[in-house]
Amino acid sequence: MLKVAIVMGSESDMPVAEKAAETLKKFDVEYAVRIISAHRMPNKLRTFALTVSDEGFGVIIAIAGLAAHLPGVIAGMTLLPVIGVPAATGPLSGRDALLSIVQMPPGIPVACVGIGNAGNAALLAVQMLSLAEPALVEKMRAYRLKFGDDAA
């Protein structure tokens, strides 16, 4: 099964990343957490983005606050789906990050969840991986039924 990469620009985003990790654990999806700043570590980020699929990853969750370049920079260098999670930081409490992530230029899509909602990012990653993993479909169905979701 493909893994999920959880990437953040700073250790201060770890509480948000932990929410994604907790959700992925519920589905027995393997993940790895990396701290790679788009601004302070551009060469390391480039290497990551160019090799991430070779390392067995299928989806990237990128957590970013303030300027929020991380999801877009990664998306510009990989063909894997990238899910951006705006972090609730700075004077605008993440609204600037939200707009930065959703306003990507044509041809470089980045999915985006709500501010700080890494749990939903993980659920979306599971749904993406379930396209090739029937067992994940069943786990997602069981998860959704817990909430009374009659569409599951």
Image (cartoon, helix red, strand yellow):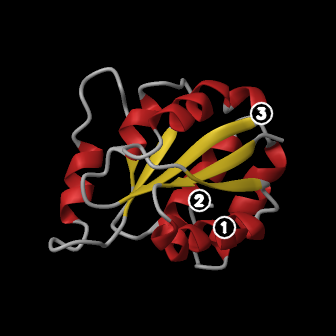
Q: Which residue is mark 1?
A: 21
Judge depth for marks 1 and 3 and give the one in front. Answer: 3
Residue 55 visible in the current orientation: yes
Separation (CA) of disc 1 from disc 2: 8 Å
Q: What separation in Å lies between label 3 and label 2 (alpha carbons)?
A: 19 Å
Q: Earlier in the sequence, mark 3 or mark 2?
A: 3
- Amino acid at the residue labelled 2: Ala
Residue at horizontal 47 percent and vertical 47 percent from the top? 83
The image quadrant where one finds the C terminus is bottom right
Q: Which mark is residue 114?
A: none
Q: Which residue position is annotated with label 3? A: 55
Q: Amino acid at mark 3?
A: Glu
Residue 84 at x, y percent in the picture: 42, 50
Q: Which residue carries the number 2 mark?
A: 122
Dot 3 and dot 2 residues touching (CB under 8 Å): no
Q: Residue at x 33, y 44 (%)?
A: 69
